[in-house]
Image (spheres, helix red, strand yellow):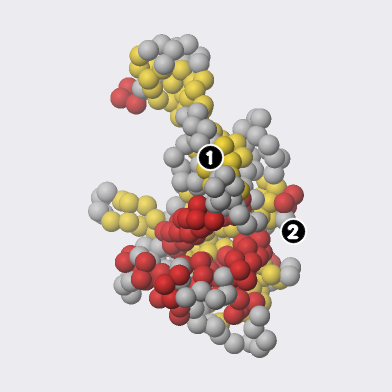
Amino acid sequence: MVLVQALYFCVPFRDQVLEYGSHNKAVGENDENLLTCLSELFVQINYQKKKTGVIAPKRFVQRVKKQNELFRSYMHQDAHEFLNYLLNELVDILEKEAKTNANGNGVLQGPTVRQEKGATNGISNGSGNGNQSQQIVTWVHKLFQGTLTNETRCLCCETITARDETFLDLSLDIEQNSSITSCLRNFSSTETLNAEDKFFCDKCCSLQEAQKRMKIKVAPRILALHLKRFKYIEQLARYKKLSYRVVFPLELKLCNTADDAPGSEAEYSLFAVVVHVGTGPNHGHYVSLVKSHNHWLFFDDENVEIIDESAVQTFFGSTQEYSNNSEHGYILFYERLDQAV
């Protein structure tokens, strides 16, 4: 549940969940969903009078297991898969409620949802198809959703084809002794399409060699970065954990935004890190680091301690393949400074 701890300390996310809970206090068992269980948990934490203690998320965990068989076993589950599941499930709940609450004119009721033309629902399915149907934009979208622009330039006629797609988090390939900035730069590096990968150019009406690159067109308010630490090794026929040292700064400036992107100079501040502890993908443990009231806290199950800010760098990773250190940053959460409350 370290991911829930990290999201609780995402202040705008917590505020929205608490607000949802205040409007859905008398929920019957038949109306219970993942968001009502999460809001109930957040309310218990937020209004707890005791200064110390443990609150077990029993109802929330039961709901997760009931809705998704992937999380029913006692096997080690991937935190990034859970993040994707949770955010998309919350989106589904809010969208269904928005449609239910819509009046005869299609105007949505309530302060947390609005409709936009041509917006996607947070799944990376692209929005460059000219579809102008109204899509529901929930507060999950407003917090986590960004837009990527996929530019492909035909090397024959120089025509550039651009396609937009939305994202709720970014998964980054990692290298040894690298940084988040270099990972983001590689994410947007130019790729040449040739041989069997040629691009069909509409202007040339044929397959052509082309150059392709992906850039951030709209930077999200909350930037969730997933470091791809688990790589499939064909020779071993299994996944292996990459313990590479990847530096993630406390303050981050996006380097791979599109030239005409609004907020292209967006700067972010790190507020949470989900850390994988262990040597492989199928076993291990998760802990979290969160920033609260300018102090960093270390969460390990029911154990919580204040740590020095400099201790965050001990979770960058290892410079050597075989190391005693098995605690590595896995999911990073940043908040935009120009939109922080």
Question: What amino acid is found at the position of numbered circle 2 in the picture?
Answer: Val
Q: 10 Å neighbourhood of mark 2: few (<14), some, or many (≥20)?
A: few
Residue named by callout 2: 341
For image coordinates 57% across by 70% down, the residue present is: 24
Tell me, yes or no, if residue 137 can be seen here.
Answer: no
Residue 84 placed where, x, y %? 45, 56
Can you identify the residue that label 1 sits on? 134
Q: Residue at x 33, y 74 (%)?
A: 74
Q: Quadrant of residue 22?
A: bottom right
**Observer able to see residue 47:** yes
Q: Position of residue 212 (x, y in %)?
A: 47, 28
Disc 2 element:
loop
User: Would you place residue 194 above or below residue 327 in this image?
Assistant: above
- Three-letter amino acid code of the residue under disc 1: Gln
Q: Nearer the viewer, residue 25 or 197?
A: 25
Is 145 above or below relative to 125? below
SS under mark 1: strand
Residue 236 percent location from the top left of the image:
26, 54
